[in-house]
Image: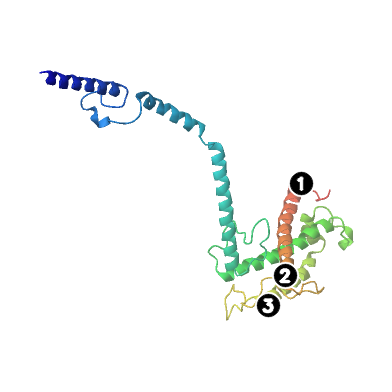
Amino acid sequence: HGSIFFVVSAALTSAAATGQQSSLGYGVTRPGSHLRKNFGQRPSTLSQRPLRSLAISRAEKPDVKKFQEDLEQKFVEKRVEMLEETQKDKADAAPIGTQGGTAPLGEFWDPASFTRDADPNQVRRYREAELTHGRVAMLGALGFLVQEKFSPLFGGNIDGPAVYHFQEISKIAPSFWYPVFLAIAIAEVGRAKLGWEDPVSGSLWGLKPSYEPGNLGFDPLGLYPKDASSAVQMKNKELNNGRLAMIALAGFIAQELVTGEELLN
C-alpha cells in the first residue's frame, strides 16, 4: 500500500507541475489543447504582435504622392521616346526623307495624318505643293509690306490696304492682268513639263520618278550649296520660311479685311 500511495503522490505532483507550466504558456492547459503545444511564446507576446506590426507598417508607409509623380514622369519619358521612334520610322520610310523635319516638331511632323494612307507619289506631290505655296507666300508677304509704302506704278494712285489693290488696279487698267496671267501660265506649264508625267502616256497626277519636288534647276545667283549637308540645311530653311510666310500672309489678309487699314498704319 505504501508503494501505491507513493506512486499516486508522484503522479499528482507531476500533474500539478505540468499544469503550472501550462498556465505560463509552455504546455497544455486543458484537454484537446495538445494541438497548440510548445508554441514557445507567451500569450502577452502574441497579443502585442498586431500592435507592433501596425507601428512598423506606419513607419514604413511609402510616399504615395512622390510615387505617383515618378510614375507619371516615367510614362511621359516613355511616351516621348515612342513618339520619336515613330517619327524616325516614318521619316526613314517617307519618299521625301527627313527634309523639313526640324526641332521642335521632330523629323516627320504630320499631326493631321495626311500621309498615313497616301502612296509615295502623293506624298511627293504634297511636298511639291508645300514648296510652291511657300515660295508664293514669301513673295506675297514681302509684297504686302512693300507696296503699301512704295507703289510707283499707275502714277502712285494705288494706295490703301494691299488686300484691295487687285480691285483698284482692275478699275484703272483692266488689261494689266492679262500679261501677268500669261506669265504665270507659262511658268506653270514649264514646271509641269519638268516634273510631271505626261497625262496622255502616264498618270494624270503623277510626278516623274527622277524629279525632286521643288527642284526646278533655277539658281541664277549660284546660292545652292555643293555639299549634301549644306544643301539639306538650305532646303530646311526654305521650307520653314515658306511655312512661316503662309501663316503670316493669311494673317495679313485677315487683319486688313477686318480692320480695313494698312498693316503698318
Q: Name the residue nearer the viewer: 244 or 265.
A: 244
Q: Position of residue 198 (x, y in %)?
A: 61, 79
Q: Residues within 10 Å of mark 3 (few under 14, many from 20)?
A: some
**N-terminal-most mark, 1 or 2:** 2
Give left or right: position of 260 versus 35.
right
Q: Which residue is at 76% across, 46% downward?
A: 259
Element type at mark 3? helix
- Tell me, yes or no, whether the two marked residues, 3 and 2, touch with CB atoms within 8 Å: no
Residue 259 is marked as 1
- Residue that protrudes farthest toward the left in the picture: 1
Q: Nearer the viewer, mark 3 or mark 1?
A: 3
Residues at marks 3 and 1, CA–CA distance in whole angstroms: 42 Å
Return the residue at label 3: 194
Q: Is residue 25 left or right of residue 83?
A: left
Q: Is mark 3 in CB contact (under 8 Å) with mark 1? A: no
Mark 3 or mark 1, earlier in chain: 3
Dot 2, how many residues are within 10 Å of its Cα: few (below 14), some (14-19), or many (20+)? few
Q: Earlier in the sequence, mark 3 or mark 2?
A: 3
Q: Which mark is residue 20?
A: none
Residue 88, placed above or below residue 200: above
Count of marks, rendered view:
3
Residue visible at 59% across and 53% down in the picture: 80
- In the displayed orientation, state which residue is furthest to the front: 2
User: Can residue 168 be seen in this snapshot?
Assistant: no
The amino acid type found where label 1 is placed reads Thr
Q: What separation in Å lies between label 1 and label 2 (alpha carbons)?
A: 45 Å
Residue matched to label 2: 229
Percent of width and height locating residue 260: 77, 48
Q: Determine the secondary structure under disc 1.
A: helix
User: Quick check: 101 above or below 29?
Assistant: below
